[in-house]
């Protein structure tokens, strides 16, 4: 009899924790709500929903936020996530620099810092990152005890379940997963995520992909990544590597890619490739205002200069973006045939060029795709920009930590 009662209590606790986690996720993603709506959403009775709300209020997870519109009688009390319950730290790492960002639980940016630490495959990178993070937290009077967890987004072949980045195996001692190494140092939960997949989650939760089921996001950064949403869920593949569009071969006699293969899409469409092509054109005598922008010092040339020149009407820079967009469109046409998306969202550094990059992408898709695939397809420049990656990492971290908090 005692065993039956114990099993019954266990089932009740599991159901209660499930409702708690679903409620907190709902408040995080959709904002404030009333007890009546909670009860309907989670198929619970009003007394049960009230009990769960009272428990979460005592634990500091939610607060009263005001009242909602009343159809009749007394206006309903609204409840929302307590933004001050925890802070989170997001480490946004790429091959050019690193951002450290503190969010509250309402996704409000508390403070951020861009630091000149470029990702390379050695232990010295993490040493520099640790020192910079300690200084960042100390200067902003944020102790590790105030943090709920740390979300890390970075490029590379990342197996999230194992906590490893196969593209950068030498960041940690041999055999030590990156997540384990970070967790040991900070003594906090760590969530490691590929930067393109983080961007995709950000777009799906907060951008043009909200309420969309079949989505592709193209992240045109220092490499080219493809994010895939199928039936409303991010598609990871068997090991978490799905979407490496930048490493399909497009030129068998092309340049050597940093991955060791020849002629990858990355070698002609990434931000690094764009800068290289710009320098080659200038050295060959092409007229352009880029030389004025960098005061004839090509070592200073960045993608931001090229985008500035594009918006100023520089013919050479416009041609460069058009060629990059066309090649990206060819690659995306293959992905469109494979996944039949309803929307493609263009993000990353080069997305700041706006229609100068999206128009050639769209024209190439129109040219190389079967017409039936294009009838229900729209293409957008991300309205979130680089914030999509930060918000996606934050959302992924929140969901991961809630699942741990209420198993």
Image (tube, rainbow, N blue to C red):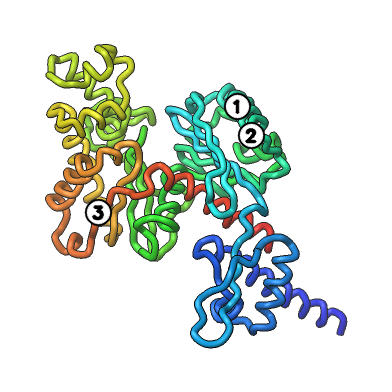
Q: Give me the residue at 68% from left, 63% from top.
A: 406
Q: Secondary structure at mark 2?
A: loop
Q: Give me the residue at 35% from left, 36% from top.
A: 221
Location of residue 58 with respect to 307 vertically, above or below: below
Lower sequence index among marks 1 and 2: 1
Observer-nearest of 140 and 98: 140
Location of residue 405 with respect to 172 vertically, above or below: below
* Distance CA(mark 1)–CA(mark 2): 12 Å
What mark, if any, has residue 140 been given in the picture? 2
Observer-nearest of 379 and 371: 379
Residue 118, given in percent of the width and then of the height, sits at 48, 25
Local crowd size for mark 1, using a 10 Å CA cut-off: few (<14), some (14–19), many (≥20): some
- Give the residue at mark 1: 132
Report if residue 271 is visible in the image.
Answer: yes
Q: Secondary structure at mark 3?
A: strand
Lower sequence index among marks 3 and 2: 2
* Distance CA(mark 3)–CA(mark 1): 38 Å
Q: Nearer the viewer, mark 1 or mark 2?
A: 2
- Give the residue at mark 3: 379
Quadrant location, the C terminus: bottom right
CB under 8 Å between discs 1 and 2: no
Residue 284, given in percent of the width and then of the height, sits at 15, 15
């Amino acid at each position: 009899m005692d065993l039956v009662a114990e099993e019954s209590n266990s089932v009740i606790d599991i159901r209660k924790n499930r409702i708690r986690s679903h409620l907190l996720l709902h408040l995080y993603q959709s904002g404030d709500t009333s007890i009546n709506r909670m009860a309907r959403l989670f198929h619970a009775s009003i007394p049960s929903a009230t009990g769960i709300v009272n428990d979460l209020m005592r634990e500091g997870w939610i607060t009263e936020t005001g009242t909602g519109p009343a159809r009749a009688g007394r206006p309903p009390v609204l409840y929302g996530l307590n933004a001050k319950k925890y802070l989170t730290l997001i480490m946004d790492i790429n091959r050019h620099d690193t951002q450290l960002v503190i969010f509250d639980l309402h996704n409000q940016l508390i403070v951020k810092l861009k630091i000149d630490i470029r990702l390379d495959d050695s232990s010295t990178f993490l040493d520099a990152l640790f020192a910079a993070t300690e200084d960042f937290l100390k200067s902003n009077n944020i102790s590790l005890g105030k943090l709920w967890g740390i979300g890390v987004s970075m490029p590379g072949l990342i197996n999230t379940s194992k906590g490893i980045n196969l593209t950068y195996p030498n960041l940690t001692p041999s055999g030590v997963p990156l997540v384990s190494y970070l967790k040991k140092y900070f003594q906090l939960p760590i969530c490691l995520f590929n930067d393109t997949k983080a961007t995709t989650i950000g777009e799906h939760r907060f951008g043009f992909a909200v309420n969309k089921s079949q989505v592709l996001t193209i992240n045109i950064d220092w490499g080219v990544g493809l994010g895939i949403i199928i039936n409303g869920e991010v598609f990871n593949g068997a090991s978490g590597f799905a979407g490496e569009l930048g490493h399909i071969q497009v030129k068998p006699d092309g340049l050597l890619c940093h991955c060791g293969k020849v002629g990858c899409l990355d070698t002609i469409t990434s931000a690094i490739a764009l800068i290289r092509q710009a320098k080659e054109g200038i050295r060959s005598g092409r007229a352009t205002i880029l030389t004025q922008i960098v005061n004839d010092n090509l070592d200073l040339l960045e993608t931001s200069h090229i985008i500035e020149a594009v918006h100023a009407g520089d013919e050479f820079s416009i041609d460069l973006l058009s060629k990059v967009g066309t090649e990206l469109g060819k690659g995306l046409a293959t992905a469109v045939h494979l996944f039949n998306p309803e929307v493609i969202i263009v993000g990353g550094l080069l997305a700041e060029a706006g229609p100068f990059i999206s128009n050639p992408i769209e024209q190439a898709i129109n040219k190389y795709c079967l017409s039936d695939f294009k009838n229900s397809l729209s293409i957008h420049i991300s309205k979130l920009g680089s914030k999509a990656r930060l918000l996606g990492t934050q959302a992924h971290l929140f969901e991961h930590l809630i699942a741990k908090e209420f198993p």
